[in-house]
Image (spheres, rainbow, N blue to C red):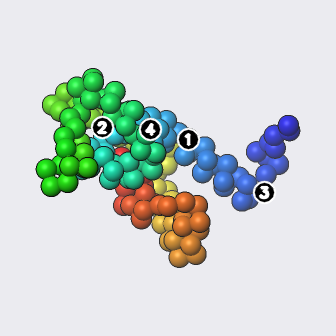
Amino acid sequence: MKFTEYRELDMAGKLIWNFRNISHILRGMSGGKGSQKRILTVLLKSGQVTQTALTEYLGIRPGSASEVLSKMEAAGLIARQENEADRRTVNIELTETGRKEAVLAAEERNRGHRKLLSGLSSKEQEELLVLLEKLSAHCKDSGLDERMGERRESDCRGNGGTE
């Protein structure tokens, strides 16, 4: 298989290549969409949530979530309890140890974000934000985001998937 070199790509190809590259960098900073670090930071932000809501928010399979959450519970990072109103529902919250780990993970992620963006001036960051918001709105308005799978508006706007 022959891979196309960056310099041989057209404008769209170069843009997509760079989006994909930055996406991989951001995914690495969070440890992946269903990683313990990401779950910790999401729970730090949201407080107690149901396992179903967390699984849907992260965009991972329930079985994958159960496996990771079991490991986190065994490590003393989270506590799971049946919901008193609906016994079929499990509530998840951070333990004190989990909260400390979540704060450290969030600080590490934020340092990474600052380092990533330090290559751009404040003005360049503002310009990039305007362009990305415009592109995100176009994706939503044209239905592209719906065709690419179930996505919540908060994934593309508001937090930029940075939890």
What's under tag 1, amino acid-wise?
His
Measure the C-alpha gap from mark 4 to mark 1. 20 Å
What residue do we see at 66% from left, 54% from top?
Answer: 16
> Which is closer to the viewer, label 1 or label 3?
1
The amino acid at mark 4 is Ser
Specify the label residue 40 is tagged with. 2
Query: Is residue 44 shown left or right of residue 147?
Result: left
- The mark lying in front, picked from 4 and 3, is 4
| Helix, strand or loop status at disc 2 | helix
Please state which amino acid type lies under the numbered disc 2.
Answer: Leu
Contact (CB < 8 A) between labels 1 and 3? no
Q: Quadrant of residue 34?
A: top left
The x, y position of residue 32, in whole percent, is 47, 38
Select label 4 or label 1 by which is in front: 4
Cα–Cα span, label 4 and label 2: 15 Å
Mark identifier at residue 64: 4
Judging by the rendered image, the residue that carries numbered circle 3 is: 10
Residue 135 in view of the camera? no
Seen in the image, is 93 located left or right of residue 117?
left
